[in-house]
Every structure is written in C-alpha cells, then in structure tokens.
Amino acid sequence: MQQRWPSRIWIVRHGESAGNVARNVAHGAGHSRIDIAERDVDVPLSPRGEEQALALGRWFAAMPSGERPQVVLTSPYRRAQGTAALIRDAGGLADRASEFVVDERLREKELGILDRLTHAGVAELYPEQAAMRARLGKFYHRPPSGESWCDVILRLRSALDTISLHHDGQRVLLVAHQVVVLCLRYLLENMSETQILAIDTQAEVANCSVTEYASAPEEGLNGGLKLVRYNFVAPVAQGGAPVTAEPDANVLDR
C-alpha cells in the first residue's frame, strides 16, 4: 500500500528566544544556572526572534499562494507559537484561514531536574548525572523527570502518523525546536544514532532555519519524503534579520 504523505513539509525552528539570550549570558559569566523567571513553555521570543520570524514569513509570502503552507502544526511553547503567528501575519500561509494546530508532541525535549542548568552547573550539582550522560551519550541519557532523545523520537513517530493520516497531499509547516528538528530528520531519513549525532555535531540548528522535504513516490517500496534543504537560513538573512544559532536554555552542551 502506498504511504500517504504531505506533498511538502517545512520544519522550522522557532526564532531566537529570551532563553537563548539568557543562556549565552550564563555561559559567558560561568554561572551554574540560567536566569529565566518563566517556565520553559512560557519563554517568549526576543526582539531579534520576532524579526527573524517576520523575515521568514515574508519569504513564504513571496511564493505563489499555491505553493505556501496550507496547514501549520506548532509546539505549544510560546516561542514556537509566536514564530508561527508572525509567519502567518507576514502573509506566509496559503490563506489567513489556513489550519493552525497546536500539537504538544512537537514540544521541546524536557530536561527534568537538569532544566536551566549550564554544563558546569550539572557537573557541580548533579555529578552522577554528568557521569551517566558521558557514559550513555545524549541519545539515550534520560535525566530524572526528563526525556532522552529516544523519548522525543517516540512521540514524534506518533505525530508523523497523524500528519500522514490527516494531511495527505497537503503542504505542511511544522514549527518546533532544535532537538525536534534533528529527531524528525532521524525518522524521515531512517538514520542511525551515529548519523544524526554527526549532523548535530556539525552545526547548531539556526533560529528560524528551514528544513524542507518534498513528496517522493519513487523513494522505497511505499514512497516517502526526500530532503530538499536543511538548516537553510537565507530567508532570514535576505530579510534583513540577524542569523542566530544558540541552543535553547534547556539544551545542555555537547
């Protein structure tokens, strides 16, 4: 049976957030903790992040309406929803009434007790977790009350099943987070742990970068999706917004 897929999927990391900025400050000062008052889910975009989202929206808006996203699925986190809303406000969707869905399965990887700690903070406050992470690797290490990459992948398998079931043949925009972008690549391209971690090591996923897939019926026995571009930042740069690639506040150093 032929696998049903959207005709096009764009996966976008949210714009720069206040958490990205606070994380840089904490690391630069050698602090153990990142100073953010809000819950991670409530961290907003920074002013630069808003510029990036609008620039990306204008890039989509320059496409013919028959090529723009018809459906938006976004993480429930404020910075992701804000990015999606600004893309819409800039005319980046096929129609103002395009379907706009919040899907909690696209949320950021949860760090549990290690949330808001720098790499130095984890080593200082939870040395046993630092040692376990070094031994298991980031793909399998699950901090108490948090998630491993494998946990994120498990929920994303479910999200992809929903997308293929409900959005067959449509043009779909996903707005999410750095680890989600990488884990979706792992799933859509049938990668190994070694392959996806090698890609992760090469460069950070930039804020408001675009990772794009197109329907490819010729791929495999049941068809699939083919990577068109990854970590594409030209829409942000050409739109006059600064390009940033900071990890989120709750993403540990490599």
Image: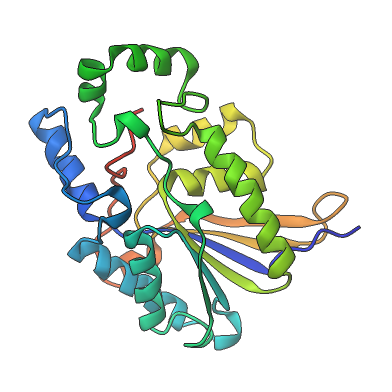
Identify the colour scheme used.
Answer: rainbow
Pick the front one: 191 or 100 = 100
Q: Residue at x 18, y 49 (%)?
A: 21
Q: Position of residue 8 (x, y in %)?
A: 64, 68
Return the residue found at the far front.
Answer: 145
Looking at the figure, which quarter contains the N terminus?
Answer: bottom right
Q: Is residue 246 above or below residue 32?
A: below
- Where in the figure is residue 241, as x and y percent of width and height? 25, 67
> How many dots with numbers?
0
Left-right relation of 195 to 144: right
- 141 up-or-down from 199: above or below: above
**Residue shown at the point (25%, 70%) measured from the top left:** 51
Instruction: State the residue at coordinates (83%, 58%).
Output: 218
Residue 45 as seen in the image, left or right of residue 7: left
In the picture, which quadrant includes the C terminus?
top left
Tell me the quarter of the picture where residue 87 sits. bottom left
From the viewer's side, name the closer residue of 234 and 45: 45
Q: Residue furthest right?
A: 1
* Residue 122 seen in the current view: yes
Q: Position of residue 203 (x, y in %)?
A: 39, 40
Left or right, 221 with respect to 102, comes to right
Residue most toward the left? 29
- Residue 115's quadrant in the figure? top left
Q: Is residue 251 left or right of residue 202?
A: left
Residue 253 can be seen, yes or no: no
Residue 204: % across, % down: 37, 42
Quadrant of the rendered structure where residue 162 is? bottom right
Vertical comparison of 206 with 174: above or below = above
